[in-house]
Structure formats: structure tokens, C-alpha cells
Image: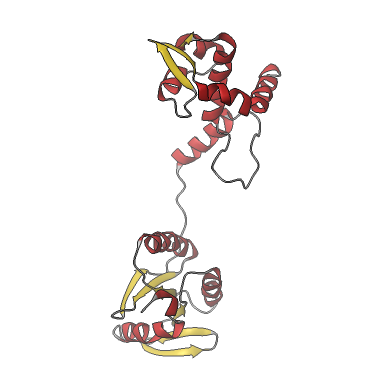
Amino acid sequence: MAASKVRETDLYAPIKLFLEGQGYEVKSEVGAADVVAVRGEEAPVIVELKARFSLSLFHQAIERQAVTDAVYVAVPRLGGKPFRKALRNNQSLCRRLGVGLMTVRMKDGLVEAHLDPAPYKPRQSKRKQARLLREFTRLVGDPNTGGSTRSGLMTAYRQDALRCLNVLMKAGPTKAAQVSQTANVTNARRLMADNHYGWFERVETGIYALSPKGESATKEFQAELERMRAASSTT
């Protein structure tokens, strides 16, 4: 069955069969819930069905948590890399919301429970926090606009490269050690050797100059270079 033709109602029979196999009595459209399953004296299980991942699906699941902790969302299982990525990302979201996640393979009705509902407390990474604060400290000023796409952002690494570019623009071919000292960039030699932006070229062992692309960058980033010079003069 093509993904575009899958309806929410197509998910119900496989989900019902799956839950009944675990000893639940299952009924659909009970109150506001798509699927309700009851087993003995246990809290009810609620499953919200959608033909695809959507914000409204998660809104519904959160609302159902006012009734029971055992809330699942269910979507058709598709093939291909985009769906695998979506499944991985939404599984992470479900974990944070305390919501379970099921998929239904439409060709044979196979139901897979990828995640069961459970309380979740995110584990913070001290390493990632340290890296974030290091980048914050190294970044001169506030050169970006919040909400911008990642492409073309002014990072601390790019600012270091611009410092090296600024030295070479003024002095011409220069030893890497001198660039490092003048630009106050400890890793200047590695940065110019890696040449991530294509701005530098090695003219002799340990001596670097601007490439044609680097010459162009002096004009492209003129405003940022001037801003960085002004910021350095006030510190």
C-alpha cells in the first residue's frame, strides 16, 4: 500500500490484533482516544493513530497522558532513509515525552513497539556543555543572528582563520609561528595547513600566504575583520 494512500483506519486492525495477542480487550474511538486497551485491573493503554508523524499526533498523545501513563503513538512503517531518520528522531522525542511508539508495516500488518512509555530525565553531557561554553568564550562579540541557518555562520574557528588571514593580508608570506604569535591563534599552523576555507597556501616549509580565495575573503569579510579589530583594541 502506497504511503500516500494509508489512512489512520488502516492501522487499527493490526494494532488491535497486536494488543489482543497480549491479553488486552481492545475498542476503538472511546471518548477522545483512537484506541483503548484494557487488561484486568491495569491502567488502560491508549494508542493514537496517524498516517504520518505530525505535531498534532504528539499533542494528542500528551493530552491522553491526563488519563493514563500508558500512551502510544502509531504510524505506518515506510521504507527508505528519510523514514528511518524520522523514526529515529521521533523515537527520541517520544522518549522525552514519556510516550510509547509503534509502527505498522502495511504489507503484512506487522506491528513493532519501538519504545514503551516511561518517565524520562535527559542526561546532560558535561563534555558537550564544556564545548558549548568554550565556543561561547572564544567567539568574539555576537556576529550571528539567532535563528539563522548553520551555513555561513561566524564560528570561533572562522574567526581564528580570519585573524590569520588578517596577518597575512598585512605582512605577506609569513612563518606560521609568527602568524600564531601576531594573530594570537595557538593552532595557526594546523589551521592554515588544514585550509578548511581554501584561504591559505604554503609557499615554503612553515611559511604561508593568502591564496586567491583568501584574497577574495579579505573583501568578503571586511566588515567582520574591522569589527574584530575594534573588539581587540578595547580589550
Task: Look at the image and tell me in which quarter the N terminus lies.
Answer: bottom left
Give coordinates of residue 231: x percent, y percent: 68, 22
Residue drawn where x is 49% and y is 36% of the image: 131
The colour style of the image is: secondary structure
Give coordinates of residue 208: x percent, y percent: 46, 13
Question: Taking 227 as reference, is 15 left or right?
Answer: left
Query: Residue 207 lies in what quarter of the image?
Result: top left
Give coordinates of residue 172: x percent, y percent: 54, 10
Residue drawn where x is 45% and y is 44% of the image: 125
Residue situated in front as seen by the camera: 71 or 15: 15
Residue situated in front as seen by the camera: 176 or 74: 176
Give coordinates of residue 90: x percent, y percent: 45, 63
- Establish if 3 lies above or below 123: below
Task: Look at the image and tell me in which quarter the C terminus lies.
Answer: top right
- Establish if 147 lies above or below 167: below
Q: Residue furthest front?
A: 212
Query: Residue 11 lies in what quarter of the image?
Result: bottom left
Q: How many marks?
A: 0
Q: Taking the image as drawn, is residue 64 in sight?
A: yes
Residue drawn where x is 52% and y is 25% of the image: 213
Query: Residue 23 lies in what quarter of the image?
Result: bottom left
Q: Taking the image as drawn, is residue 187 in sight?
A: no
